[in-house]
């Protein structure tokens, strides 16, 4: 078995993917914004947060759809875009992954060629009213879909009390087909078109809705922030976005007590890697 990658090795491979992603977006005039911990790392550390092992970018829905279509038509060697609806893929958003690595996650099944990744989230339109209700609906359908078709089943003693309903819910939820869940999620996310919406958000959010809402004006203009050897596109008001996401103490590093996104290994011999 290949040796497990360190956090530093995962970050280096993810930075390589970011460089590929940024170059592709520049070539095709696609808009994106680094976000969440990736934005925090760029502003505070000029690179990844030292203990973080994932990368997040946001794309307006029209750019997101074009990116997925164009990249899958002309992928960079050694990389792959997974998108919602792919066989065995459990998520409602895309990932750009490294095919020279393999990653296994504890709780969710991914395809065999899944590796070190960057998350590519679409920004979708919000209704003028009932925003929390809309977000809650999308989130619940997405979680039930995962429980029904992609959740790994740990032994019961390893489950947190609040998660012990997932297994029976997943069994019951299989009365609805995987394809129908995917149609429900996609239709809900696109219900309020990005182009005509006054406010937009990442609808599969793990954060409170109020931290996710963007006025369209916030997405105008751009800044380029250093991230290791790269200069990546970011919000013009990045510090305001970070304060909204993480509160007024976002400048103070606090090592988060959380598990990593998975165990990553190299697929190819060490002497053949670039």
Image (cartoon, rainbow, N blue to C red):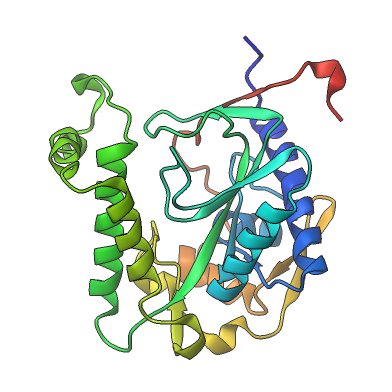
**Furthest residue toward top:** 1
* Residue 13 seen in the figure: yes
State whether residue 178 is above or below residue 269.
below
Residue shown at the point (75%, 53%) measured from the top left: 74
Residue shown at the point (28%, 23%) measured from the top left: 154
In the rendering, at what x and y percent does residue 22 appear? 76, 60
* Residue 248 seen in the figure: no
State whether residue 257 is above or below residue 204.
above
Task: Out of 161 and 57, give the one closest to the viewer.
Answer: 57
What quarter of the picture does the C terminus occupy? top right
What quarter of the picture does the N terminus occupy? top right
In the rendering, at what x and y percent does residue 34 appear? 64, 63
In the rendering, at what x and y percent does residue 126 appear? 38, 80
> Could you tell me how many numbered marks the image carries?
0
Task: Out of 148 and 208, give the one closest to the viewer.
Answer: 148
State whether residue 96 is above or below residue 187.
above
Q: Quadrant of residue 227?
A: bottom right
In the rendering, at what x and y percent does residue 139 appear? 30, 59
Is residue 102 rendered to the left or right of residue 76? left
Residue shown at the point (19%, 41%) measured from the top left: 174
């Amino acid at each position: 078995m290949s040796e497990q990658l360190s956090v530093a090795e995962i970050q280096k491979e993810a930075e390589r993917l970011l460089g590929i992603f940024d170059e592709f977006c520049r070539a095709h005039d696609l808009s994106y914004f680094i976000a969440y911990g990736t934005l925090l790392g760029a502003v505070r550390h000029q690179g990844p947060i030292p203990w973080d092992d994932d990368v997040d970018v946001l794309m307006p829905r029209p750019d997101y759809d074009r990116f997925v279509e164009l990249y899958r038509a002309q992928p960079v060697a050694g990389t792959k875009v997974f998108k919602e609806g792919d066989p065995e893929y459990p998520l409602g958003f895309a990932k750009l992954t490294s095919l020279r690595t393999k990653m296994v996650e504890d709780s969710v099944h991914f395809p065999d060629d899944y590796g070190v990744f960057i998350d590519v989230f679409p920004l979708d339109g919000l209704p003028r009213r009932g925003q929390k209700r809309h977000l809650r609906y999308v989130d619940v359908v997405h979680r039930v879909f995962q429980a029904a078709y992609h959740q790994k089943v740990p032994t019961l003693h390893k489950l947190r009390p609040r998660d012990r309903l997932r297994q029976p819910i997943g069994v019951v939820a299989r009365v609805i087909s995987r394809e129908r869940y995917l149609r429900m999620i996609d239709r809900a996310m696109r219900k309020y078109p990005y182009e005509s919406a006054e406010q937009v958000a990442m609808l599969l959010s793990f954060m409170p809705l109020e931290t996710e809402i963007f006025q369209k004006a916030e997405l105008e203009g751009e800044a380029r922030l250093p991230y290791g050897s790269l200069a990546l596109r970011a919000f013009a008001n990045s510090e305001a976005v970070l304060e909204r996401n993480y509160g007024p103490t976002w400048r103070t590093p606090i090592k988060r007590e959380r598990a990593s996104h998975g165990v990553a290994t190299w697929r190819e011999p060490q002497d053949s890697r670039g």
